[in-house]
Amino acid sequence: MDQVSISLLDESDIDMLIPLAYRIWHAHYPEIISVEQIDYMLERGYTRQVILDEIHNQGVIWLTIKSGDSMIGFAALGPHAPGVMKLHKLYLLPEHHGTGIGARALAEVERIARLNAASALVLNVNRHNTKAIRAYERAGWQVAETVVVDIGNGFAMDDFVMAKQLP
């Protein structure tokens, strides 16, 4: 784990991040949502243009998680409300689950949020993604509400909104 680094996304890494997102989502989500919804959400959220727009126009901070030179995960957080940032994404290849890398990434997200004057973080997580929910709870997050969001094409996100106050 000591060779794992978490750093700001370099735009040259976007072409490595997109196929990684596809690999992670297709490994993790088929038991939770349909493959059709997985592909629909990936096509909408993981293009070079979308990521660059988030970075340059929406204040989203993208991070890469690398083991040596290999990208093994990523995270993204951005402004949500006064004093609140939202963790939009935190994904890690399944073979790195349970190693403490996710906890390190969450700690880095919290550090960045505090640097951006946030006193709280929020995130959405699929209500049936029990593995992720347990990981967030271990890190001090709590379920704040349940939301169902229509994302188009006949698909919906059935999520918990989780929150964490930052010290």
Image (spheres, rainbow, N blue to C red):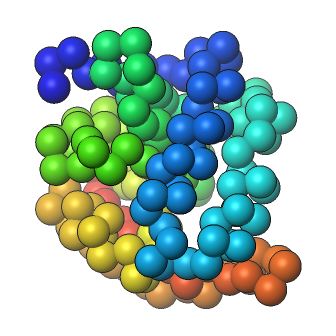
Q: Kindly indicate the quadrant of the structure image that contains residue 155.
A: bottom right
Residue 84 seen in the current view: no
Please give the name of the residue rendered at 44% of the width and 77% of the height, measured from the top-left corner. Answer: 31
Q: Kindly indicate the quadrant of the structure image that contains residue 12.
A: top right
Q: Nearer the viewer, residue 167 or 43?
A: 43
Please give the name of the residue rendered at 46% of the width and 37% of the height, measured from the top-left corner. Answer: 74
Q: Nearer the viewer, residue 41 or 22?
A: 22
Please give the name of the residue rendered at 82% of the width and 77% of the height, measured from the top-left corner. Answer: 152
Please give the name of the residue rendered at 77% of the width and 40% of the height, measured from the top-left corner. Answer: 47
Place of residue 132 in the rendered image (x, y in percent of width and height, measured from the top left):
32, 65
Place of residue 90 in the rendered image (x, y in percent of width and height, measured from the top left):
43, 48
Quarter of the image that includes the N terminus: top left
Q: Nearer the viewer, residue 65 or 29?
A: 29
Residue 33 seen in the current view: yes
The answer to whether 110 is drawn above or below residue 131 in the figure is above
Place of residue 62 in the rendered image (x, y in percent of width and height, measured from the top left):
55, 32
Q: Kindly indicate the quadrant of the structure image that contains residue 67.
A: top left
Q: Is residue 50 left or right of residue 132?
A: right
Q: What is the tally of numbered marks visible in this picture?
A: 0
Q: Is residue 119 left or right of residue 141?
A: right
Place of residue 53 in the rendered image (x, y in percent of width and height, measured from the top left):
80, 35
Q: Is residue 43 left or right of residue 88?
A: right
